[in-house]
Amino acid sequence: MTVNNQKTSFRSIAGFLFWVGICFFVAWTASLVTPEAVASEWYRSLNKPVWNPPDWLFGPVWGLLYAFMGIAAWQVWRKFGFREAGIALFFFLVQLVLNGLWTQIFFGFRNPGLAFIEIIFLLAAIFVSIILFFQKDKLAGWLMVPYFLWVGFATALNGAIWMMN
Protein backbone atom coordinates (compact mmCIF):
# COMPACT_ATOMS: atom_id res chain seq x y z
CA MET A 1 0.00 0.00 0.00
CA THR A 2 1.41 3.37 -0.96
CA VAL A 3 1.55 6.37 1.33
CA ASN A 4 -1.25 8.07 -0.64
CA ASN A 5 -3.48 5.00 -0.32
CA GLN A 6 -2.79 4.89 3.41
CA LYS A 7 -3.70 8.57 3.74
CA THR A 8 -6.87 8.05 1.72
CA SER A 9 -7.81 4.99 3.75
CA PHE A 10 -7.17 6.79 7.06
CA ARG A 11 -9.14 9.83 5.83
CA SER A 12 -12.05 7.62 4.80
CA ILE A 13 -12.12 5.75 8.14
CA ALA A 14 -11.80 8.99 10.11
CA GLY A 15 -14.61 10.53 8.03
CA PHE A 16 -16.81 7.49 8.59
CA LEU A 17 -16.24 7.69 12.35
CA PHE A 18 -16.95 11.44 12.30
CA TRP A 19 -20.24 11.25 10.36
CA VAL A 20 -21.61 8.20 12.13
CA GLY A 21 -20.29 9.54 15.44
CA ILE A 22 -22.00 12.92 15.07
CA CYS A 23 -25.31 11.17 14.37
CA PHE A 24 -24.96 9.00 17.45
CA PHE A 25 -23.92 12.05 19.47
CA VAL A 26 -27.33 13.53 18.64
CA ALA A 27 -28.90 10.21 19.64
CA TRP A 28 -27.02 10.34 22.93
CA THR A 29 -28.24 13.87 23.68
CA ALA A 30 -31.79 12.66 23.04
CA SER A 31 -31.25 9.74 25.40
CA LEU A 32 -30.49 12.17 28.21
CA VAL A 33 -34.11 13.34 28.32
CA THR A 34 -36.08 10.51 26.73
CA PRO A 35 -35.91 7.59 29.23
CA GLU A 36 -36.88 9.59 32.28
CA ALA A 37 -39.50 11.49 30.27
CA VAL A 38 -41.06 8.29 28.92
CA ALA A 39 -41.21 6.93 32.45
CA SER A 40 -42.54 10.20 33.79
CA GLU A 41 -46.07 10.75 34.97
CA TRP A 42 -46.42 13.51 32.36
CA TYR A 43 -45.68 11.25 29.38
CA ARG A 44 -47.70 8.31 30.70
CA SER A 45 -50.67 10.61 31.30
CA LEU A 46 -50.74 11.82 27.70
CA ASN A 47 -53.54 10.56 25.53
CA LYS A 48 -52.01 8.73 22.56
CA PRO A 49 -53.59 7.30 19.42
CA VAL A 50 -54.11 3.54 19.23
CA TRP A 51 -51.45 3.38 16.50
CA ASN A 52 -48.77 4.73 18.85
CA PRO A 53 -45.90 2.19 18.70
CA PRO A 54 -44.72 0.53 21.91
CA ASP A 55 -41.96 2.45 23.70
CA TRP A 56 -39.41 -0.37 23.23
CA LEU A 57 -39.57 0.03 19.42
CA PHE A 58 -38.20 3.57 19.28
CA GLY A 59 -34.63 2.76 20.39
CA PRO A 60 -33.88 0.06 17.79
CA VAL A 61 -35.55 2.01 14.97
CA TRP A 62 -33.68 5.20 15.79
CA GLY A 63 -30.41 3.30 16.16
CA LEU A 64 -30.75 1.95 12.64
CA LEU A 65 -31.83 5.32 11.25
CA TYR A 66 -28.90 7.17 12.84
CA ALA A 67 -26.51 4.58 11.36
CA PHE A 68 -28.09 5.02 7.90
CA MET A 69 -27.89 8.81 8.23
CA GLY A 70 -24.23 8.73 9.19
CA ILE A 71 -23.35 6.37 6.35
CA ALA A 72 -25.27 8.55 3.88
CA ALA A 73 -23.44 11.71 4.94
CA TRP A 74 -20.11 9.88 4.90
CA GLN A 75 -20.81 8.57 1.41
CA VAL A 76 -21.45 12.09 0.09
CA TRP A 77 -18.49 13.57 1.97
CA ARG A 78 -16.15 10.74 0.89
CA LYS A 79 -16.97 11.16 -2.79
CA PHE A 80 -17.26 14.95 -2.96
CA GLY A 81 -15.89 16.55 0.21
CA PHE A 82 -17.10 19.84 1.61
CA ARG A 83 -15.95 21.78 -1.43
CA GLU A 84 -18.29 20.00 -3.87
CA ALA A 85 -21.03 18.89 -1.47
CA GLY A 86 -21.03 21.73 1.05
CA ILE A 87 -24.67 22.66 0.57
CA ALA A 88 -25.85 19.05 0.85
CA LEU A 89 -23.78 18.47 3.98
CA PHE A 90 -24.90 21.81 5.43
CA PHE A 91 -28.56 20.80 5.08
CA PHE A 92 -27.72 17.42 6.56
CA LEU A 93 -26.23 19.15 9.62
CA VAL A 94 -29.24 21.51 9.86
CA GLN A 95 -31.65 18.58 9.91
CA LEU A 96 -29.45 16.82 12.46
CA VAL A 97 -29.63 19.84 14.80
CA LEU A 98 -33.40 20.00 14.31
CA ASN A 99 -33.58 16.27 15.05
CA GLY A 100 -31.88 16.74 18.40
CA LEU A 101 -33.92 19.84 19.17
CA TRP A 102 -37.23 18.03 18.70
CA THR A 103 -36.51 15.60 21.54
CA GLN A 104 -35.58 18.44 23.85
CA ILE A 105 -38.78 20.34 23.02
CA PHE A 106 -41.17 17.39 23.22
CA PHE A 107 -39.72 15.50 26.20
CA GLY A 108 -37.47 18.05 27.91
CA PHE A 109 -39.85 21.02 27.74
CA ARG A 110 -42.95 18.80 27.59
CA ASN A 111 -44.37 20.87 24.76
CA PRO A 112 -45.99 18.73 22.03
CA GLY A 113 -47.42 21.81 20.28
CA LEU A 114 -44.08 23.53 19.80
CA ALA A 115 -42.50 20.17 18.99
CA PHE A 116 -45.07 19.69 16.23
CA ILE A 117 -44.14 23.01 14.64
CA GLU A 118 -40.46 22.16 14.94
CA ILE A 119 -40.85 18.67 13.44
CA ILE A 120 -42.42 20.17 10.31
CA PHE A 121 -39.20 22.16 9.80
CA LEU A 122 -37.24 18.98 10.49
CA LEU A 123 -39.22 17.05 7.88
CA ALA A 124 -38.63 19.82 5.32
CA ALA A 125 -34.88 19.86 6.07
CA ILE A 126 -34.71 16.08 5.68
CA PHE A 127 -36.52 16.34 2.35
CA VAL A 128 -34.06 18.94 1.08
CA SER A 129 -31.16 16.79 2.32
CA ILE A 130 -32.52 13.78 0.45
CA ILE A 131 -32.85 15.72 -2.80
CA LEU A 132 -29.32 17.09 -2.47
CA PHE A 133 -27.92 13.69 -1.53
CA PHE A 134 -29.62 12.02 -4.51
CA GLN A 135 -27.95 14.58 -6.77
CA LYS A 136 -24.58 13.49 -5.41
CA ASP A 137 -25.00 9.78 -4.72
CA LYS A 138 -28.05 7.54 -5.18
CA LEU A 139 -27.13 5.22 -2.30
CA ALA A 140 -26.82 8.18 0.08
CA GLY A 141 -30.22 9.45 -1.02
CA TRP A 142 -31.84 6.05 -0.53
CA LEU A 143 -30.25 5.65 2.91
CA MET A 144 -32.10 8.80 4.00
CA VAL A 145 -35.54 7.69 2.77
CA PRO A 146 -36.40 5.41 5.76
CA TYR A 147 -35.53 8.31 8.06
CA PHE A 148 -37.85 10.64 6.14
CA LEU A 149 -40.67 8.08 6.31
CA TRP A 150 -40.18 7.53 10.05
CA VAL A 151 -40.10 11.25 10.79
CA GLY A 152 -43.22 11.64 8.62
CA PHE A 153 -44.90 9.04 10.83
CA ALA A 154 -43.51 10.79 13.93
CA THR A 155 -44.95 14.07 12.65
CA ALA A 156 -48.41 12.53 12.41
CA LEU A 157 -47.99 10.96 15.84
CA ASN A 158 -46.76 14.22 17.37
CA GLY A 159 -49.71 16.07 15.83
CA ALA A 160 -52.18 13.48 17.12
CA ILE A 161 -50.76 13.61 20.64
CA TRP A 162 -50.87 17.39 20.59
CA MET A 163 -54.50 17.42 19.42
CA MET A 164 -55.57 14.73 21.88
CA ASN A 165 -54.12 16.62 24.83
Image: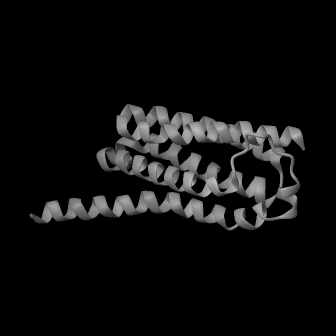
Asked whether 61 or 65 is in front, the reply is 61
Please state the horizontal and vertical placement of residue 147, each as a whole percent of the image. Answer: 54, 42
Vertical arrangement, residue 29 with respect to residue 79, above or below: below
Which of the image's four quarters has the C terminus?
Answer: top right
- Residue that appears at 76% across and 46% down: 115
Is 39 left, or right, of 24 in this rendering? right
On screen, 11 above or below 96? below
Q: Is residue 153 above or below residue 73?
A: above
Res. 25 image quadrant: bottom right
Left or right of residue 164: residue 89: left
Q: Nearer the viewer, residue 117 or 143?
A: 143
Residue for point 63% across, 64% down: 29
Q: Seen from this angle, which residue lies furthest left?
A: 2
Q: Quadrant of residue 157 in the image? A: top right
Q: Is residue 19 left or right of residue 34?
A: left
**Could you say where residue 10 lies in the image, as x and y percent from the top left?**
26, 65
Q: Which quadrant is home to the N terminus? A: bottom left
